[in-house]
Image (cartoon, rainbow, N blue to C red):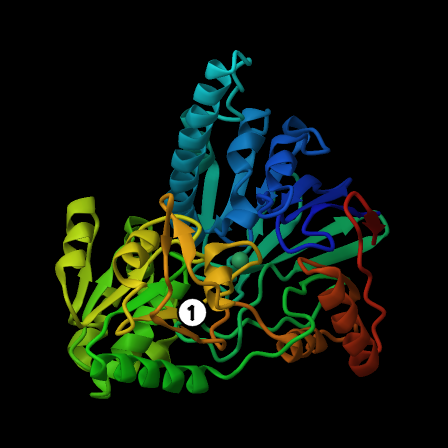
Amino acid sequence: MARLTFYGAAREVTGSCHLLEAPAVGRVLLDCGMHQGGDAVDRNDGDFGFDPAAIDAVVLSHAHLDHSGLLPRLYHQGFRGLIHCTAATAELLEVMLKDAAGLYFRDLERANLRNARRGRPEEPAAYAWDDVAAVLQACAGHRYREPVALERAGTLRFHDAGHILGSAICELSFEEEDGPRRLVFSGDLGKHDSVLMREPERLAEADLVLLESTYGDREHKTEEDTLTELRDVLHETWRRGGNVMMPSFAVGRAQEILFHLGRLYSAGELDPWQVFLDSPMAIAVTRVYDHWLKLLDEDDVRSLSEPHRRSLETFLPTLRLTEDTDASMAINRIDRGALIIAGSGMCTGGRIRHHFKHRIWDARNTVVFVGFQAEGTLGRLIVDGVSPIRMFGDEFVVKARVATLGGLSAHAGQSGLVSWLGAFDPAPQTVLVHGEAGAQKALAARIRGELGIEAEIPGRYDSIDF
Ligand SMILES: [Zn+2]
């Protein structure tokens, strides 16, 4: 008998972490992600709920921190096995874990300075730089579809999930005393028409499927409509003699935007903007994407005219990468025609706030939102029409036009999820993870109606045998 226990992303969208235990394979952890939002700090600092030293191996679906962010803590607390992932994920992971560690140690130092001033004890670090290095050392990078022998027994295969570079659907097969078992973990599944990413691969065989359900209750606009919206809002701002500020996530979304701009450029539909990718993290990630161009959607890459299709940095000949702070600040001197892509994606920090400081109060400019803005973030306030906004201890009136492009998503919508699950024959035992309760209920209802499967929705610490 095999058992799965859910330690995160159970009736919620972050903290992906599931434990597979079976006599044949031992203890295999699927993802080891950070909790984000809400009571995230307590959840990340708390116990795992299992003994990290007793884990034989980790299988990592992709590099996003809500799937990978607790790996350094896992190592710090005694884990010494291999971390299986795709080779592209391993490369992205280096950028992401180092960036996250930098922020973590900076925040910890500030918190401990506060503690010292108040006469309170110092808060110990949950992990050290050495643990980050050890995690990167422990990563075993594999190709899609390559059979990988697990530590004890069993075979692992990664399939393209089409979500971000290197993202994988994880298929584990092993023998139990009473027969073979096949577990398929969807990871995060991409949207079928998203650019740069291929379609999520469809699998046909599984005893149990762990299916993500982030957008289990909704559909997305098409990518084509989104491109039209983008073209129009840029053109309109150009005619007003303004500038564009585009808050963007560093992984996936920024590269997708560069591609869209490249397509508009190739089609002669882009005004002569000076485009800046003003985020060291997004620049580093873009270089990893460049290294793995062969994993991206061939048709998309080929749709660009010849000299521009060789690297994401050349997709758009007018693109400038501003790594250091001086180059970033020099953008402030441009009066019109600057299109600035900067982080953070929800404007909670990063360089985008500095660009807002210089430009959000000027009616010629436009803020273009290309990603989800969570409740309580500065991005959400701006989308909701709040003005003035507060930043840097000052007030700023929002006179810039605010546009939201709703169609860009790295996740499949409801129909995409149902159709991916429908490819399995016969119907597998199905478990919904990585979604909020409402989205999961809606998805379960549609799965019941269309596929006749009674999907299970486990809570945190629940176990399922199969
Ligand atoms: Zn993800």
Would you say 76 lies left or right of 446 here?
left
Is residue 279 rendered to the left or right of residue 425?
left
Tell me where residue 412 sits by quadrant. bottom right
Taking depth in this image into account, of 142 and 341 the one nearest to the observer is: 341
Q: Specify few, some or many for label 1: CA neighbours under 10 Å numbering under 14, 14-19, or 20 or more.
A: many
- Number of marks: 1
Question: Which quadrant of the figure has residue 7?
Answer: top right
Q: Position of residue 120 (x, y in %)?
A: 55, 14
Q: In the image, what residue type sits under mark 1?
A: Val
x 55%, y 59%: residue: 374
Vertical position of residue 317 compared to residue 183: above or below:
below
The picture quadrant where one finds residue 389 is bottom left
Q: Nearer the viewer, residue 240 or 313?
A: 240
Residue 144 appears anywhere in the view: no
Query: Could you say where residue 207 lies in the image, as x and y percent from the top left?
Result: 77, 62
Q: Secondary structure at mark 1?
A: loop
Q: Is residue 79 visible?
A: yes
Residue at 46% across, 15% down = 117
Indicate the position of residue 233 as horizontal and vertical percent values: 33, 81
* Residue 403 locus on image (x, y percent): 41, 75
At horizontal 25% and vertical 57% (from top left) the residue drawn is 358
User: Which residue has dot 1 on it?
Assistant: 370
- The quadrant the C terminus occupies is bottom right
